Image: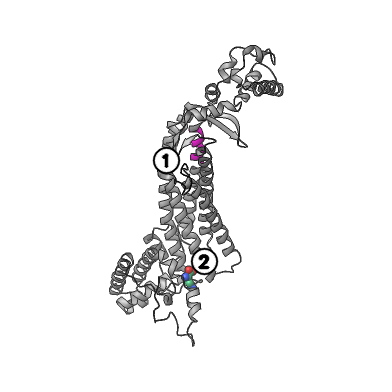
Amino acid sequence: MSTVNTEKLSSARFAEATDAFVEVYTASVDFDQRMAQQDIEGSLAHARMLQSIGILTEQELKDIQSGLAQIAEEIEQGKFQWSIQQEDVHMNIEARLTDLIGIAGKKLHTGRSRNDQVATDIRLYLRKEIDLILQQLQRLQTALLDLAEREADTIMPGFTHLQVAQPVTFGHHLMAWFEMLSRDRERLLDCVKRINIMPLGAAALAGTSYPIDRQMTAELLGFSRPSNNSLDSVSDRDFAIEFAACGSLIMMHLSRFSEELVLWASAQFDFIEMPDAFCTGSSIMPQKKNPDVPELVRGKSGRVSGHLISLLMLMKSQPLAYNKDNQEDKEPLFDTADTLLNSLRAFADMMPNIQSKKENMYQAAKKGFATATDLADYLVRKGIPFRDAHEVVGLAVRLGIESSRDLSEISLNELQQFSQQIEADVFDILSLEGSVAARKHIGGTAPDTVRKAVQTARKQMQLG
Ligand code: ARG
């Protein structure tokens, strides 16, 4: 929490002090202090640039550097006195710098404004957060590849409409998850390209009359280049919206995975055993083992989509250039980053410890006439038009339902009453193993194809 400081920000123009409530209402320091490290980084680069063009002396630069180093330490150790009266992270740090080093501290803000400063800080902050998010994403992807390889031969029902459709391998199902995350990763990497452009130098909105070297500051801060237009630089938060959109998609995917895990862990499906460490019991029902982690991830996906909408709404009516509205971008952004990081981490930790219940999966696949399409394809190969084959199989399925048997359990004689084209070799394709093994084209569910897909994915991940 912040304390109240007696020195007020930029007060010379004002005859009256700020209303005490307004001071609190307009302050952002309680949350934007999270960007303190980036603010200091930005100031160090700005100061070096100012010195290089002769606006700061070498001594002033040194003073600023040592002052900022001390401030960084104070913040790290929790000793820094944050003040509501200094409004935000930027003013707090600058005021402390002036306390520490005097006049050189007051020169730091030459040729910049909080408007380009804050835009720079957010970009630096997001860049760092995305790095961490990508690391967790990669951990999760690697865990999925390991599990997919382990489960390449495990047969389970594939569903459409949540009805048993056709048999698939569990490895194939997991590789579907992997693919979703691969696109999420690409999206984040693409988003970083637009985040990594430097607004610093746009100053308040119109640039500055000092001969600043923006190329130099961009290089010092690791930005790919300075931004092209000063008005745009201080005003648009589209990069933040884009990040929230990437985040919403990731959370939407994790939420879908969660939903499946929750279903599979239920007594009705009983396809997997969730690791105890990721579940909790019930305070009243002693038998319960609740899949809390996936449930919570599913729940948290809502707030990230909410942040995306908040940011879109925040932006949509703002005239150029900077408006105070933009101060509202921080909390949704911080929470998006936190939620993503924690949810991905929870998933990456949990995934290697999920145990499949192979026999249950197999029996479930057997139950829903999952090889009916294989029988139709078999008849087509024997020269029957697909629509007629569809009809024949429909009759066979009806017999199966009436006599509580899977297609593979109906005798050849009985099957032949529906079509004379059916011969003894039909049983090869009516088995679940035969059905999945036959789907060996690129993107198919055959165990060997899944193993190949895992290998290809591993290579792609190594290439980055
Ligand atoms: N705390 C402000 C924000 O988050 C910093 C920029 C304020 N600029 C200004 N001219 N009031 O956007």
Labels 1 & 2 near each other (Cβ < 8 A): no
Vertical placement of residue 377 versus 150, above or below: above
Mark 1, residue position: 275
The residue drawn where x is 63% and y is 25% is: 373
Quarter of the image for residue 81 reads bottom left
Earlier along the polypeptide chain: callout 1 or callout 2? 1
- Circle 1: element type: loop
For the N terminus, which image quadrant? Answer: bottom left
> Within 8 Å: ligand 1 and the Cβ of disc 1?
no
The residue drawn where x is 51% and y is 44% is: 258
- Horizontally, residue 202 falls left or right of residue 401, namely left
Residue 250 location in percent, x, y? 51, 48
**Which region shows up in magenta?**
171-179
Tag nearer the camera, 1 or 2: 1
In magenta segment, residue 156: no
- Horizontally, residue 225 falls left or right of residue 75, namely right
Out of 390 and 134, give the one closest to the viewer. Answer: 390
Q: Is residue 115 visible?
A: no
Mark 2, residue position: 328
